[in-house]
Amino acid sequence: MPRAPSVQLGIVGKPNTGKSTFFAAATLQDVKIAPYPFTTIDPNVGVGYVRLECVCKEFGVADNPVGSYCINGWRFAPVELIDVAGLVPDAWQGRGLGNRFLDHLRRADALIHVVDVAGSTDSEGRPVRPGTHDPLEDVGFLERELDMWIFSMLEKDWKRFAMTVEATGSKLEEELYKRLSGLQIDSASISEAIEAAGLRGKRPTLWTQEDLLSFVHEARVRAKPMVIAANKADLGPARANVERLREALGGRYVVIPTSAEAELALRRAAAAGLIRYLPGDRDFEVVGKLSPKQEEALEYIRRNVLKVWGSTGVQEVLNAAVFGVLGYVAVFPVADEHKLTDSEGRVLPDVYLMRGGSTVRDLAYAIHTELGERFIAAIDVRTKRRLGADSKLQHRAVIKIVAGR
Ligand SMILES: Nc1nc2c(ncn2[C@@H]2O[C@H](COP(=O)(O)OP(=O)(O)O)[C@@H](O)[C@H]2O)c(=O)[nH]1
Ligand SMILES: [Mg+2]
């Protein structure tokens, strides 16, 4: 049975930026796509994939992936995508059901902020003439909504919480960790956030609203790292706006131009056998019989997206979220280090996405609790070197776990 993906990515933004199109393009799942707000109420949950160079070519084997897949030496490893309904200003206060939608983001490890970089929708997602809305505003708005959402979890009874912490002498970090559990934030990040907000050593009963807000901001940046999908990059005003976003946000966020609509069209054409195209490819090849209309549409994509930006950007966003901002590594565990098989004889069946800094023992536990408990050592199959429990996993490592009985 394929494992559940170990990474969750939340797709966020105001209505009508192309979130559901992005989701559909990444998952090939049917979703409602419409040029008006509030199309999606319950989140769409589905499986997308990060793309990496498989090790099958290097080892000269034909592989039998389970749960992931491999095409022409490219391995696609599953990640869970959550397409949340559009957030409008003051969503955190419940506007447009916003606080309900925000709660769908609790378990996300990272966020993909889909921005309408063509400026063709106003701050609430209503269509306007392309180029008239400033997408930079949308980035600030979303950050504020996310911060206020977390703020509202703490602010309500902060005084009482702070007094209890002081009276019982418990550690502030630990108590905050408990309060914010479910947000996928670890205790190290909470400690860092206190530090970054300049609140180390300040008694919690003395924290002002501003203190709390700046702590929340620092915690959110760590708990929900974000990639910006500068979507509708196929439209005219996008080019200048991508530059503007990069200039304004360059240090804080990766900004990747995308055309979710182009990716969706290419993937559907590929699924229909009309073109050869893999997500993330720089171009496609026509292999089927196209109608003049199809040909025109595909040529449009080639000219306005692929030639301009190098790809549709959708795959790049997923990869940037997982391997970039989250710093995950992909590893291939095997049971037989000579045949590269699992216990059932399948060649390189699995690829595990593991947090950066994870050790080979962590990998053993991720495969099976029992394997973790019986862990003795690991073998780096590429170099044949023996690895101790605390060796850090390297990206694209092939690992055999040696366990006792
Ligand atoms: N030009 C262009 N339009 C897009 C793109 N992605 C989505 N759209 C259009 O934007 C509108 C809203 O899309 P949808 O995915 O429903 O947005 P959501 O409300 O954010 O989920 C639809 O008319 C889409 O066809 C894109 O990359 N380029
Ligand atoms: Mg939608």
Image (spheres, rainbow, N blue to C red):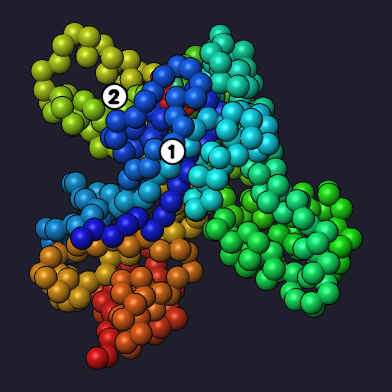
Residue 170 image offset from top left, x and y in percent: 75, 76
The residue identified by callout 1 is 43
Q: Element type at marker 2?
A: helix
Q: Residue at x 60, y 18 (%)?
A: 122
Q: Quadrant of residue 277?
A: top left
Amino acid marked by disc 1: Pro
81 relative to 160 in the view: left or right: left
Residue 282 in sight:
no
- Residue 230 versus residue 45: which sits nearer the camera? 45
Q: Residue at x 54, y 38 (%)?
A: 101
- Residue 151 versus residue 220: which sits nearer the camera? 151
Q: Element type at marker 1?
A: loop
Q: Quadrant of the C terminus?
A: bottom left
- On residue 265, the disc is 2
- Residue 361 versus residue 84: which sits nearer the camera? 84
312 relative to 198 in the view: left or right: left
- On residue 18, the disc is none
Q: Quadrant of the N terminus?
A: bottom left
Instruction: Identify the residue at the far bottom of this view.
Output: 405
Q: Residue at x 32, y 87 (%)?
A: 374
Residue 99 image offset from top left, x and y in percent: 60, 39
Residue 49 in sight:
yes
